[in-house]
């Protein structure tokens, strides 16, 4: 233990703590721009966390604390120096906060406001630097439908680079050049779209400013809502309901499903459906696809051609699908051919619901609210639609929905709860589990077990695949007809670093699984790149617990028991993996 004083108050901390830890323990404020709770290290590059330690100015985040240290955070010297550093950053920052997508949710703007940082004349036109020295990079990269980059807004904190390299193991983003010319950029190619970026958006979710952001489409959606030309249909992903409250000032893990639906209705959506319904549909399609592959592998059925390989990998995470297509194309046959729930919902609404209601698909605008940036790219894939219309017309992130609510002065948190519309507003507890890493697996097990054995699953919770651990595994005993029992080995991983490790093990033959769930974002969709940028050590844990609590409080907890799913098969699709189901709900991949 060490003892020290912060602004005259004594604090006690374990050995190895930093000055920043001491200041935080004392409850005093210190600004940070490069430090972030989700990053494994502190680059110490922004220099705004200067405090006085034993009368000398030191950066709090990367200075070790010591016994007897006298720390002051509020001296004139500290405030003056921090203000000066911020003023330098401001002098190279564009003044377009009014139309910036993160206006009001910008850590840099907050600091400029808090320290009343004056506007100094621009030292030199920053664009000149880039144009002179980085001919291959453009200042504004809008090449991807998912993520955009505005280098003018970048304050060079390098959070994004650390995230891409160390949290995601992607090494797509790097820091280039030195001194004033230092800037972030994409390796290999000048444009994001041509790089190996999988658009997971983890870099976006730590960006303190609006330099990296989702490629927004809330303005187009607002115009569509207000023009009243189209029938506007929204769907909301499982993980949005446990995070959108944060955009309205509520604590992480607040469940605001009903208020969110009410808010969407106030925005002008005619129908609000639940992606959980489509997650249930995915379980039916993917579960039966898995069973088919298992039966072939077990020799219970014969295949006409080469049987599809095991393990089967889930295909609902679009960043993971892109990773397979670009870096592991030999694993494409292992990917489930199922579209993601987002796309299954779009296809079902446009092809089935429209027909049921005598509507033309082109008169309907389908908008998804997703915790994800990569979903924007998934929706834009040319194969995601038919007869000249797309399954999904626009994808908004959870953050964009929060912005729309604020823009329209809708105080979501205070609205009376509303319910999803019929028939695609009915989802099971299994469907909502998709939001957590391990959730697809747990949902699939609930259905596959009962379909195969004809018996009720004794325990609905599959504890082995719960929690935030990067890789988890479990095995399941399935009793087939007669006395034959088969073991199904499953694995779950979240975060690209873990996914890569698992893929390498599968390729090397050192891991032997039948079914693997992969989500690119740590924690799964609850930690998606489109979620609110709430900082704090336990944000993911709280969102995760909220998802589990929604499931355990539900009566309908298994996908195959969802009455609207049963009706869809009875009336339109026949049975899972039927020709009609394949036409609407399955897809192909490209290498
Ligand atoms: Fe997800 Fe999914 S779980 S991918 O994280 O399979 O985005 O929430 O909507 O499509 O259901 C995201 C979440 C989401 C899909 C489902
Ligand atoms: Fe890296 Fe993901 Fe950001 Fe792409 S979206 S640069 S892969 S962190």
Image: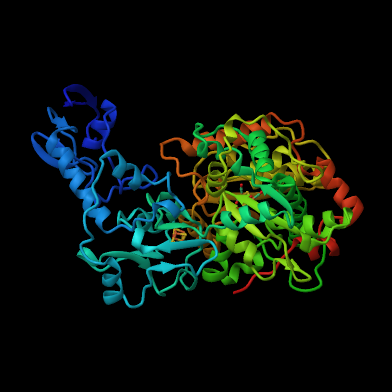
The vertical placement of 547 against 136, above or below, is above
Q: Is residue 574 visible?
A: no
Q: Tell me if residue 302 comes above or below residue 207 in the rendering.
A: below
Which quadrant of the figure contains the N terminus? top left
Residue nearest the observer in this picture, 74 or 379: 74
**Can you tell which quarter of the image residue 321 is in?**
bottom right
Q: Residue at position x 85%, y 63% from top?
A: 580
Q: Is residue 120 left or right of residue 580?
A: left
Please provide percent x and percent y for residue 186. 39, 68
Outermost residue on the front side: it is: 227
Side of 276 where 106 appears, left or right: left
Q: Position of residue 354 (x, y in %)?
A: 83, 56
Q: Could you say which is closer to the camera, residue 464 or residue 488?
A: 464
Quarter of image, res 14: top left
State the image quarter where residue 115 is shown.
Answer: top left
Residue sitting at 30 percent across and 71 percent down? 130
Question: Image point 74% across, 67% down: which residue?
Answer: 389
The image's colour scheme reads: rainbow
Q: Position of residue 129 (x, y in %)?
A: 26, 71
**The quarter of the picture showing ligand 2:** bottom left
Where residue 90 appears, as percent x and y from the top left, is 27, 53
Which image quarter holds the C terminus?
bottom right
Q: Residue at x 51, y 39 (%)?
A: 247
Residue most extreme to the right? 571
Q: Which is more toward the observer, 554 or 96?
A: 96
Name above or below for residue 445 compared with residue 153. Answer: above
Does residue 29 appear anywhere in the picture? Answer: yes
């Amino acid at each position: 233990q060490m003892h020290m004083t912060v602004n005259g108050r004594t604090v006690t901390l374990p050995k190895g703590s930093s000055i920043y830890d001491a200041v935080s323990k004392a409850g005093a404020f210190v600004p940070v721009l490069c430090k972030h709770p989700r990053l494994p290290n502190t680059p110490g590059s922004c220099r705004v966390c200067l405090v006085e330690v034993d009368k000398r100015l030191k950066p709090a985040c990367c200075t070790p604390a010591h016994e007897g240290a006298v720390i002051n955070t509020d001296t004139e010297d500290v405030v003056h120096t921090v203000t000066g550093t911020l003023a330098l950053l401001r002098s190279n920052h564009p003044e377009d906060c009014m139309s910036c997508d993160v206006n009001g949710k910008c850590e840099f703007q907050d600091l400029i406001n808090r320290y009343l940082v004056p506007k100094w004349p621009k030292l030199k036109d920053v664009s000149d630097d880039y144009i002179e020295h980085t001919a291959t990079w453009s200042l504004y990269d809008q090449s991807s439908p998912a993520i955009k980059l505005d280098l003018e807004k970048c304050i060079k904190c390098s959070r994004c680079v650390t995230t891409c390299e160390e949290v995601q193991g992607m090494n797509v983003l790097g820091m280039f050049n030195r001194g004033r010319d230092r800037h972030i950029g994409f390796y290999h190619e000048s444009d994001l779209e041509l790089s190996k970026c999988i658009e997971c958006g983890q870099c976006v979710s730590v960006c303190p400013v609006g330099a990296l952001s989702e490629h927004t489409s809330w303005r187009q959606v607002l115009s569509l809502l207000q023009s009243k030309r189209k029938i506007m249909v929204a769907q909301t992903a499982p993980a949005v309901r446990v995070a959108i409250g944060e955009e309205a000032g509520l604590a992480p893990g607040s469940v605001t499903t009903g208020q969110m639906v009410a808010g969407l209705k106030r925005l002008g959506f005619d129908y609000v459906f639940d992606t959980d319904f489509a997650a249930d549909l995915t379980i039916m399609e993917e579960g039966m696809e898995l069973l088919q592959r298992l039966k072939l592998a077990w020799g219970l059925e014969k295949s006409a051609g080469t049987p599809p390989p095991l393990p089967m990998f889930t295909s609902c995470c679009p960043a993971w699908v892109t990773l397979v297509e670009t870096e592991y194309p030999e694993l494409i046959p292992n990917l489930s051919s199922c579209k993601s729930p987002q796309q299954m919902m779009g296809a079902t609404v446009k092809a089935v619901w429209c027909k049921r209601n005598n509507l033309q698909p082109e008169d309907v605008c389908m908008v998804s609210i997703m915790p994800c940036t990569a979903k924007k790219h998934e929706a834009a894939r040319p194969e995601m639609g038919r007869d000249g219309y797309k399954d999904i017309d626009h994808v908004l992130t959870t953050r964009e929905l929060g912005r729309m609510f604020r823009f329209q002065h809708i105080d979501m948190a205070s609205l009376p709860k509303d319910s999803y519309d019929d028939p695609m507003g009915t989802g099971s507890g299994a469907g909502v589990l998709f939001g957590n890493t391990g959730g697809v697996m747990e949902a699939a097990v609930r259905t596959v077990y009962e379909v195969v054995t004809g018996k009720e699953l004794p325990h609905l919770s599959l504890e082995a695949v719960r929690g935030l651990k990067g890789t988890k595994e479990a095995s399941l005993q399935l009793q087939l007809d007669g006395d034959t029992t088969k073991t199904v080995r499953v694995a779950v991983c979240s975060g690209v670093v873990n996914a890569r490790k698992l893929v390498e093990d599968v390729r090397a033959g050192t891991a032997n699984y039948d079914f693997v769930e992969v989500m690119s974002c740590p924690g799964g969709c609850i930690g998606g790149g489109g979620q609110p940028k709430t900082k704090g050590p336990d944000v993911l844990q709280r969102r995760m617990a909220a998802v589990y609590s929604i499931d355990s409080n539900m009566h309908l907890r298994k996908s195959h028991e969802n009455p609207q799913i049963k009706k869809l098969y009875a009336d339109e699709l026949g049975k899972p993996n039927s020709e009609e189901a394949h036409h609407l709900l399955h897809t192909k991949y490209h290498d």
